[in-house]
Image (tube, rainbow, N blue to C red):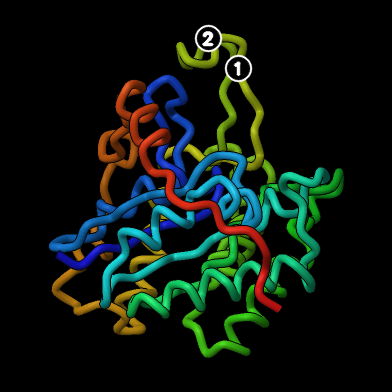
């Protein structure tokens, strides 16, 4: 069976029940797919660098098969300081992305670059900011240089966040009042991670782009035009299963970017 492998950080990864309702868009991808396995290997806190060095990319490369897709979505953690995560957008970040593309193609599979959705950051006048800075642009450049498909979740999200505005974004991102959810008894205000409704719409966009670009046969898609209750549709991993998958999906470490 054809598979879609997802690599990326916390905006993509599937969350365990103890983190609900925090949801990554990769967690919602199966709602729009059929006859294809969605293998979400994204991990919270991962950058292009740490994902390689900790064997996450290695596991994908050991298991991906000719004809499979590899959706590659990084950026928010690459911009964080520290030797374990940080990459420069037009230097080792691009080099790492090239490595992902090359290694995927060497196995007969198809890389697809997906710039991360923006954080919902507004100034005091309601003007939208773009905190991911140059990382989406750097990924677009790699896609153009390597003739790799690009699904621009970043630009799509910017248009949506601006339309919603500061208050509307609180219905999409993880904003909860104290006592609103048992997993966050003191409440939470998180403009980086989404709840189910945001994750579902991001996944819908990605799946719709895969279909319109004919990157997979049309028969592999479902529900893209259908509206449904995201809170009821999204499933969360059992904490024990989450821990098992996190530990098992580790392969050979890969060190060093491709120039």
Residue closest to the far front = 252
Mark before the other along the chain sequence, 2 or 1: 2
**Which one is in front, 42 or 233?**
42
Contact check, label 2 and label 1, Cβ < 8 Å: yes
- Tag 2's secondary structure? loop
Whole-number angstrom distance, CA of label 2 to CA of label 1: 7 Å
In the rendering, at what x and y percent does residue 6 appear?
41, 57
Q: Position of residue 87 (x, y in %)?
A: 76, 58
Marker disc for residue 179: 2
Measured as percent of width and height from the top left, residue 52 is found at 57, 55
Q: Residue at x 31, y 59 (%)?
A: 63
Where residue 139 sits, quadrant-wise, is bottom right
- Tell me, yes or no, if residue 147 can be seen here: yes
Q: How many marks?
A: 2
Residue at coordinates 69% horizontally, 72% vertically from top-left? 94
In the picture of the structure, the residue carrying the numbered disc 1 is 187
Identify the image quadrant of the N terminus: bottom left
Task: Say which of 15 and 32 sits in front.
Answer: 15
> Which image quarter holds the C terminus?
bottom right
Q: Taking 63 as reference, is 259 left or right?
A: right
Q: Is residue 157 left or right of residue 221?
A: right
Quarter residue 174 falls in: top right
> At x 27% / y 69%, what residue is drawn?
65
| Disc marking residue 162 | none
Point 26% across, 58% down: residue: 32
The vertical placement of 143 against 191, above or below, is: below
Element at label 1: loop
Judge the density around disc 2: few (<14), some (14-19), many (≥20) Cα neighbours within 10 Å.
Answer: few
Q: Is residue 6 left or right of residue 152?
A: left
**Is residue 198 in view?**
no
x, y (%) of residue 183?
48, 15
């Amino acid at each position: 069976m054809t598979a879609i492998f997802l690599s990326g950080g916390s905006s993509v990864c599937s969350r365990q029940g103890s983190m609900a309702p925090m949801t990554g868009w990769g967690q919602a991808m199966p709602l729009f797919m059929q006859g294809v396995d969605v293998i979400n290997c994204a991990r919270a806190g991962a950058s292009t660098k740490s994902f390689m060095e900790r064997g996450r990319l290695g596991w994908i490369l050991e298991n991906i098969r000719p004809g499979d897709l590899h959706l590659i979505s990084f950026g928010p953690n690459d911009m964080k300081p520290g030797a374990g995560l940080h990459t420069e957008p037009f230097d080792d970040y691009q080099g790492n992305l090239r490595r992902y593309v090359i290694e995927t193609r060497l196995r007969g599979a198809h890389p697809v670059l997906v710039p991360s959705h923006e954080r919902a950051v507004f100034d005091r006048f309601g003007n939208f900011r773009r905190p991911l800075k140059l990382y989406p642009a750097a990924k677009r450049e790699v896609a153009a240089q390597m003739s790799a498909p690009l699904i621009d979740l970043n630009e799509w999200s910017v248009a949506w966040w601006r339309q919603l505005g500061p208050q509307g974004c609180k219905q999409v991102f993880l904003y909860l009042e104290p006592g609103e959810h048992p997993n966050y008894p003191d409440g939470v205000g998180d403009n980086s991670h989404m709840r189910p409704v945001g994750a579902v719409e991001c996944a819908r966009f990605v799946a719709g782009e895969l279909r319109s670009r004919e990157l997979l046969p049309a028969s592999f898609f479902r529900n893209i035009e259908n509206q449904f209750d995201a809170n009821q549709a999204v499933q969360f991993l059992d904490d024990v299963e989450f821990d098992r998958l996190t530990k098992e999906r580790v392969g050979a470490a890969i060190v060093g970017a491709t120039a």
